[in-house]
Image: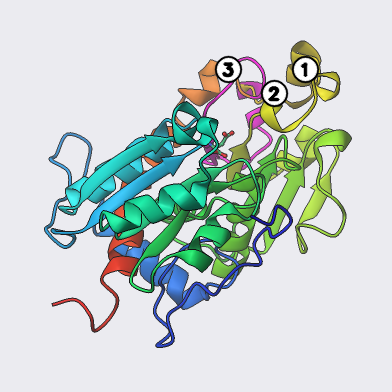
Amino acid sequence: MNPTAGSNGPPQRRPDGSLRHLLTLESLSRTELEQLLERAQGFVRPVGERPARSAALAGYTVANLFTEPSTRTRVSFELAAKRLGAQVVNLELQLSSRLKGESMLDTVYTLQAMQVDAFVIRDAEAGVPQAVAANVAPHVSVLSAGEAHVSHPTQGLLDALTIRQRKGRFEGLSMAIIGDIRHSRVARSAWHALRTLGVRDLRIAGPAALMPDATEFAGCSRHTDLTSALAGTDVVMMLRIQKERMGEADLPDAAQYFAAWGLTRERLAAARTGAIVMHPQPMNRGIEIESEVADGPQSVIRDQVRNGVAVRMAVLETVLTPRGAAA
Ligand code: ASP
């Protein structure tokens, strides 16, 4: 594996232009993003109704290979594949072969020999989904479920879907992403998706040590305090501190962090009336967000979770049954 590969991997498309892998949102056009959102919206059902199902992936097998902890992403990929009729295998590699020295690629080759059609990969090392995509058989697809701090494409899509449902548009919206931007793959994928979809006023804010390098997040304004970041925004995305991507010594004090950056009901009043509050979870209540906001009327955090399944259904169906190939 090339740890520096980041998002520069093999092409995501087949020679006919259809999407074969989903490793990053960077190269997706606005039309492609809108088509994925439209397809995902078709899988959303109101709370209390039975979830959407189809047999589109009957006969396919999807393997979830996760080496970093995950709750929502892993479960929602599993539900998405099952609701489309696929079989699913789940491997938490830190608990099994990787510890014994077997590489990710060897695991992939083993599963490929068992006729797995799609690999869903999460790893703390940049470049792993790309390395797998570069080595699988031509009919096999690879989906990133979170690549180090670099990208989390299905999260970017589910965030965009949630905003579209609540605001009905992207143009003219103001959005602030607040917290540990530096180590956040969620922020990077949100930025890729939302600027392509037409959000022009994108703001990032957090303590100086948790802000990204100046070369990153082109087109975003940078804010050094919460109130100026929130002023007049329609969408507020709060992020947790990515403890696992920094040394103990660099961790901010929780109480000081909440005092400066924690989203409270009073502080949220700086945003536009009816602004929505997002969080990819896991949440640290009382550090980056207080419970009153997380569970309050402006929170769309549970919509994000529900939309995650729909988005993953749309992505799985798109890559495994490309235009023209499906019956
Ligand atoms: N669940 C998200 C991720 O995998 C956000 C987080 O962990 O803070 O990146």
Q: Amino acid at mark 1?
A: Ala
Q: Amino acid at mark 2?
A: Gly
* Tag 3 near tag 1, CB within 8 Å: no
Residue in the foreground of this view, choosing between 26 and 69: 69
Quadrant for the N terminus, please.
bottom right
Mark yes or no: residue 52 visible: yes
Q: Earlier in the sequence, mark 2 or mark 3?
A: 2
Q: Give the class, few, some or many, for how many residues have Cα within 10 Å of label 3's Cα (few <14, many ≥20).
A: some
Q: Residue at x 67, y 64 (%)?
A: 200
Residue holding disc 1: 259
Left or right of 265 on screen, residue 178: right
Distance from disc 3 to disc 1, alpha carbons, whole Å, reads 13 Å
Quadrant for the C terminus, please.
bottom left
Q: Which mark is residue 262?
A: 2
Looking at the rendering, the stretch of residues picked out in magenta corresponds to 265-288
Predominant SS along the magenta part: loop
Q: Residue at x 72, y 36 (%)?
A: 180
Q: Viewer-nearest of labels 3 and 1?
A: 3
Q: Which mark is residue 285?
A: 3
Left or right of 319 on screen, residue 235: right
